[in-house]
Amino acid sequence: MKTIEVVASIIHQNGKILATQRGYGDFKGLWEFPGGKIEPGETPEEALCREIQEELGVTIYVENHICTIEYDYPNFHLTMHCYLCTLEANSGASEIELREHKSSRWLAPASLDEVEWLPADREVIEMLKSDPISSF
């Protein structure tokens, strides 16, 4: 089975977490943490900063790695490295530009179940609901 390795950004601000809705592909309409594939020669942190700039037009600060999720989709195995991040001071929430996603929402931890997440992201959601962001 093909393995895909990606990074995901859990961007937090004012006690809320950024969720983005996919606007393309097999999982169009489902929600995810923004991020993407690691290119050859990149560190996971470099890939995350590049992907967020490409997808959302903002600069992030990568705080720390919080978990790695291993998930088997029907056609591939996903390894997803998840990092807690914040927007850089010059990149406010109002400056987010949806270049690949069709929608975004800032959700409080208690509201994370209000959207339909991609299966691999659900494992991270359960962790975020049980542990406040400050514990990471």
Image (spheres, grey):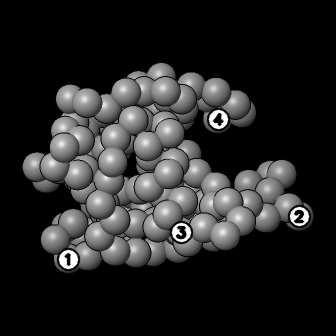
- Among the two numbered marks 1 and 2 on one chain, the one whose residue lies closer to the N terminus: 2
**Is residue 53 depicted above or below 36 in this figure?**
above
* Residue at mark 3 to residue at mark 1: CA–CA distance: 22 Å
Which kind of residue does numbered mark 3 sit on? Pro
- Please name the residue shown 40% across and 66% down the image: 83
Quick one: 117 or 96, which is closer to the camera?
96
Q: Which mark is residue 63?
A: none
- Among the two numbered marks 2 and 3 on one chain, the one whose residue lies closer to the N terminus: 2
Q: Which residue is mark 2?
A: 1
**Total labels drawn:** 4
Q: Are marks 1 and 2 in contact (CB under 8 Å)?
A: no
Q: Which residue is mark 4?
A: 27
Which kind of residue does numbered mark 1 sit on? Ser
User: Quadrant of residue 49 in the image?
Assistant: bottom left
User: In the drawing, does residue 71 fall left or right of residue 61?
Assistant: right
User: In the drawing, does residue 119 fall left or right of residue 56?
Assistant: right
User: Quadrant of residue 64 in the image?
Assistant: bottom left
Residue 103 placed where, x, y %?
41, 25
